[in-house]
Image: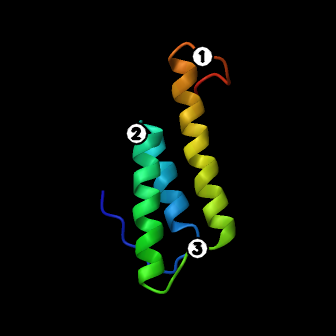
Amino acid sequence: MAYAWAKDEPNAVASYLSDLGDRGHPSNTLEAHFATLRALRVIDNAPLSDVEIRACHLIVRHRAGRRRTRAGGTGPAPC
């Protein structure tokens, strides 16, 4: 799947990370993609908003929680 969005499109990075999570990628992959895309947006003079940064962190944490649950830990049931 190709992701084509304007460099300053709101919530594009959060949407991309959510899609990766839905496809089963682990939280450390989401963290790596987020860090890279966040840095590239700064270089392109289109930094992520504080709201989008928080949303991305929540997506990564949610994915990490689902992984712990599947590994036998406590937490919400996987979707």
Label 3 to label 1: alpha-carbon separation: 35 Å
Residue drawn 63% across the image and 22% down it: 77
Residue drawn 58% across the image and 47% down it: 59
| Mark earlier in primary sequence (1, 2) | 2
Q: Is residue 7 visible?
A: no
Residue drawn 60% across the image and 41% down it: 61
Q: Is residue 16 visible?
A: yes
Q: Given the image, on which type of amino acid does mark 1 rest? A: Gly
Q: Residue furthest top?
A: 72
Note whether 6 is above or below 66 in the view shown. Answer: below
Note whether 44 is above or below 19 in the view shown. Answer: below
Q: Which residue is mark 3?
A: 10
Q: Given the image, on which type of amino acid does mark 2 rest? A: His
The 10 Å Cα crowd at callout 1, few under 14, some 14 to 19, many 20 or more, is few
Looking at the image, is mark 3 or mark 1 nearer the viewer?
Answer: 1
Please indicate whether residue 6 sits to the left or right of residue 55 in the image: left
On the image, the x and y values in percent for residue 40 come to 40, 74
The 10 Å Cα crowd at callout 2, few under 14, some 14 to 19, many 20 or more, is some
Circles 3 and 1, Cβ within 8 Å, touching? The answer is no
Q: Which residue is mark 1?
A: 73
The 10 Å Cα crowd at callout 3, few under 14, some 14 to 19, many 20 or more, is some
Residue drawn 50% across the image and 17% down it: 71
| Mark earlier in primary sequence (3, 2) | 3
Q: Which residue is mark 2?
A: 25
Numbered disc 2: secondary structure: loop
| Mark earlier in primary sequence (3, 1) | 3
